[in-house]
Amino acid sequence: MKNTLKRTFGASLAALLASSATLVCCVLPAVMVSLGAGAVLVGLISAVPQLVWLSEHKVLVFGTAGVMLLLSGIMLVKAIRLPCPIDPRGAKACRRLRKFSVGLFSAGFVTYVVAVGFVLVAILH
């Protein structure tokens, strides 16, 4: 059971990182250009050229992040149904890890939705 909770935490963390990639590929450039920081964006792309790859492969980035969020959500729902240990110390750690995993998943989901919103606005305008 403890191993399942750790895997759920890891899946939530991976989903958050994947959904953060959607922000980096799509939201960051749009916001920087909108704020008149195009030169800063050029400098950032010069320093980290992998950002161009992320922007060119938006479908792959968003698809991967969406699948990871879905898997993380499924694992989270299954882990929440598991009982926590009987001893008070283990039970407290179990509840804390569950809360943290839900928080990570929520942050990843919100990040993903914001990035999708930015991409849809960019496509429609």
Image (spheres, rainbow, N blue to C red):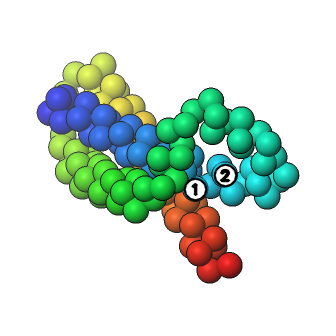
Q: Is residue 58 above or below residue 12?
A: below
- Quadrant for residue 118, please give it: bottom right
The residue to which callout 2 is attached is: 29
Q: Quadrant of residue 14?
A: top left
Residue 79 percent across, percent down from the top left = 22, 45
Q: Residue at x 25, y 53 (%)?
A: 71
Element assignment for label 1: helix
Closest to the observer, 64 or 69: 64
Residue annotated with mark 1:
26
Residue type pointed to by label 1: Cys
Please determine whether, in this image, residue 86 is positioned above or below residue 27. above
Q: Is residue 13 above or below residue 55?
A: above
Nearer the observer, 2 or 44: 44
Q: Residues within 10 Å of mark 2 (few under 14, many from 20)?
A: many
Q: Residues within 10 Å of mark 1 (few under 14, many from 20)?
A: many
Q: Quadrant of the C terminus?
A: bottom right
Q: Secondary structure at mark 2?
A: helix
